[in-house]
């Protein structure tokens, strides 16, 4: 389950920022997750709660924000939103697409005290 490793990485980032910026608790963490990131959100939420115990984000609300998948279509020259990595272009039906986003995951922001 790579969600545990993701939660542990998030914990490391939170701990580093808590030391650097002097906050003691995280009330809410907003996480952006791309459509193609391969993250199982229920599993990540479970792992987040377990991994944050004893740290500044214990009990923090985790909000996961979905980011769309986007690709450049070489047939029509447009950047388009796609539902699946191998989907055809929704504008022209072309099949020559290069994904440009959708596999990212990043902390958008945190509410801290």
Image: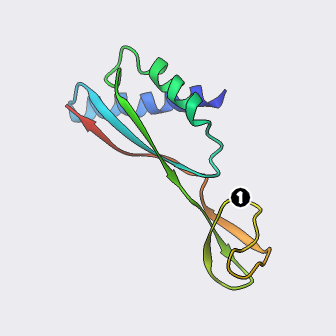
Q: Quadrant of the N terminus?
A: top right
Q: Residue at x 51, y 50 (%)?
A: 66
Residue at 35 percent of width and 19 percent of height: 55
Q: Which residue is mark 1?
A: 84
- Coordinates of residue 105 in the picture (x, y in percent): 52, 46
Query: Dividing the picture into quarters, in which one does residue 52 lie?
Result: top left
Q: Is residue 113 above or below residue 58?
A: below
Give the residue at the far right of this rendering. 95
> What residue sits 56% from the left and 59% below the top?
68
Q: Judge from the rendering whether residue 72 lies leftward or rightward of residue 28; answer left or right.
A: right
For the point 70% across and 69% down, the residue is 98
Q: Label 1: few (<14), some or many (≥20) within 10 Å?
A: some
Q: Quadrant of the C terminus?
A: top left
Quarter of the rendering containing residue 94: bottom right
Residue 31 place in picture, x, y as percent: 44, 43
Residue 104, placed above or below residue 27: below
Q: Position of residue 71 (x, y in %)?
A: 65, 69
Residue 4: x and y, percent?
58, 25
């Amino acid at each position: 389950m790579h969600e545990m490793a993701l939660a542990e990485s998030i914990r490391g980032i939170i701990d580093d920022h808590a030391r650097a910026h002097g906050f003691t608790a995280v009330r809410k963490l907003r996480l952006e997750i791309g459509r193609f990131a391969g993250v199982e959100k229920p599993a990540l939420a479970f792992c987040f709660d377990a991994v944050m115990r004893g740290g500044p984000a214990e009990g923090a609300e985790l909000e996961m924000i979905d980011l769309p998948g986007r690709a450049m279509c070489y047939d029509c020259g447009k950047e388009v939103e796609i539902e699946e990595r191998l989907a055809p272009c929704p504008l022209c039906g072309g099949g020559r697409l290069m994904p440009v986003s959708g596999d990212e995951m990043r902390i958008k922001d945190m509410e801290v005290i």
